[in-house]
Amino acid sequence: MLNSKDLNFSFSGLKTAVLYAFRENQKINKAVLAREFQNAAVDVLVTKSLKAVEKYGPRALIVAGGVAANKKLKQALAKTLNASRLPLKTF
């Protein structure tokens, strides 16, 4: 997803991969698996958001709903947007 030219994203494939990884190895560290899932999702959301910002040139980036509560995502977006001086609004 990171290298696609469009702004679409879906985590269904990633969720399935996590499910299969857990089914294949029930001794897998769940905390590590969850952290890696979050890291992958944050990478995609930040990358796609930046592509959208570059394409459409908004005055601010708004993140709302449950995803806006994710501290790691907010930190990653704020850090990335800081260089462009684009405000990040979360609701």
Image (cartoon, grey):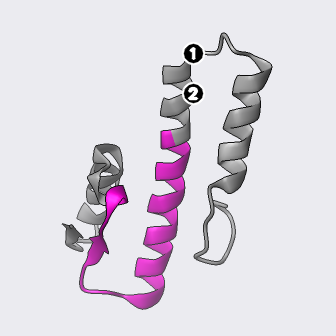
Residue beneath the point at 73% across and 40% down: 17
Residue 29 disc label: 1
What is the x, y in percent for residue 11? 62, 55
18, 50: nearer the viewer: 18
The amino acid type of the residue labelled 1 equals: Asn
- Could you say which is closer to the camera, residue 88 or residue 81? 88
Mark 1 is surrounded, within 10 Å at the Cα level, by few (under 14), some (14 to 19) or many (20 or more) other residues, namely few
Specify the segment rendered in magenta.
38-67
**44 w.r.t. 63: above or below:** above
The N terminus lies in which quarter of the figure? bottom right
**Which numbered marker is on residue 63?**
none
Residue visible at 69% across and 69% down? 4
Pointers 1 and 2 in contact (C-beta within 8 Å) = yes
Judge left or right: residue 81 versus residue 31: left
Disc number for residue 33: 2
Instruction: Please state the horizontal and vertical placement of residue 55, each as a whole percent of the image.
Output: 48, 86
Q: Badge 2 local density, few (<14 within 10 Å), some, or many (20+)?
A: some
